[in-house]
Image (spheres, grey):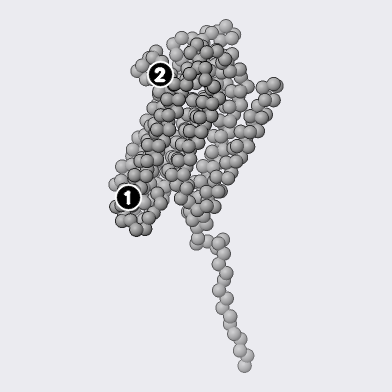
Amino acid sequence: MAHDTNLSPEEQHKKNVKHIIFVALLLFFVTVIEFILAFIWPDTWNRELLNGLFVALTLVKAFYIVAEFMHLKHEVKTLIWSIGFPTVFIIWLLVALVYEGEHMISF
Amino acid sequence: MSTTATVVKTPKKSIWDGGVSPLKASYGKLMMWFFLLSDAFTFSALLITYGTIRFMHPAYDGLFSEFTFSDQHWPIPEKVFNAFPFFHGVDMPLIFVGLMTFILILSSVTMVLAVEAGHRKDQRDVEKWMLWTVIGGITFLGCQAWEWGHFIVGTGTPTILSNGVAFEGANLTQNQYGPPLFADLFFFITGFHGTHVLSGVIINIVIFYNVVMGTYERRGSYEMVEKVGLYWHFVDLVWVFVFTFFYLI
């Protein structure tokens, strides 16, 4: 919802609502695609590939919720980084536990 | 006669002197962001724990269509969550969870519309969209209550556990769907998310009340709607991840 100075309040309002509906439809269709994939995926195909697709589509949805609905994309760069960068710790936890998970299984 | 020149020094302005908004966001909004970041860590830890515990258990390695419940292998979520209210015994994998997802996304959309109306200082519109958001949240909680009820009561056909006992439904120590930890993680992860939705609904109701009473109209700013909006979108964001990692994969 970036503000364009040469638009009248009424035009700005219409533009914002249009954008919100665009993001909403995008989230809706990505979820529908996930559903269709879950149902049509044949038994014999690689499940890991399907899971990879699910994770990728989830990240697309997460990006649009955080960037547009939570408006983070339109904040100043420092704020974007102070929220975005610490999420590397989540990646680290994921890698650490998946790696350590091997030892936990054999234990 | 001594002439003492009084030099008036203008004090140096520092960003720490106050009166400015670092990061061009208000204090409340910034702190909401950092709270949500810490909450994201909590939810990630829960979901990553789910992944680790799942990989510690043997996976089902037969044909997908011939899957049966057993506490010897991790269940396929599609086979566990396949019930729908008023359609008893009909196999509708993930349809109900899908419906819950759409309800939550929809209530997120009405929340953005409330924030947008707040920017225009349109009290009636903010009231309308906040009310829809509250209704969406309550509907989601109702769905979750049904889901929990069905999960606890069971499918109607008991599973013979490895200790020879026929068991139906689920509690914290045993369940008919899979290893005990499966039900524990279900209760913990969806329960923790549900608690967030519940507190979100309560905060939304408080904000809705303030909007109706004209508190923000007098204050001249609807920023509180924005802050509670951030929290509400976060709840939706977490559900997107729970939906993928608990139900789809």
Question: Contact, CB < 8 Å: mark 1 with mark 2?
Answer: no
The chain that hosts pointer 1 is: A
The numbered dot on residue B92 is 2
Residue B147 image point, x, y percent: 43, 23
- Would residue A55 be seen by someone viewing this image from the given angle? yes
State which quadrant residue B142 falls in. top left
Mark 1 residue crowding within 10 angstroms, few (<14) / some (14–19) / many (20+): some
Residue B50 image point, x, y percent: 57, 27
Q: CA distance from mark 1 to mark 2?
A: 41 Å
The C terminus of chain A lies in which quarter of the figure? top right
Q: Is residue A6 above or below residue B194?
A: below
Q: Residue at x 59, y 23 (%)?
A: B54
Identify which residue, B3 or B232, lies in the foreground. Answer: B232
Q: Amino acid at mark 1?
A: His
Q: Is residue B227 above or below residue B134?
A: below
In the picture of the structure, the residue carrying the numbered disc 1 is A13
Q: Amino acid at mark 2?
A: Met
- Would residue B191 be seen by someone viewing this image from the given angle? no
Q: Residue at x 61, y 19 (%)?
A: B57
The chain that hosts pointer 2 is: B
Residue B111 image point, x, y percent: 38, 41
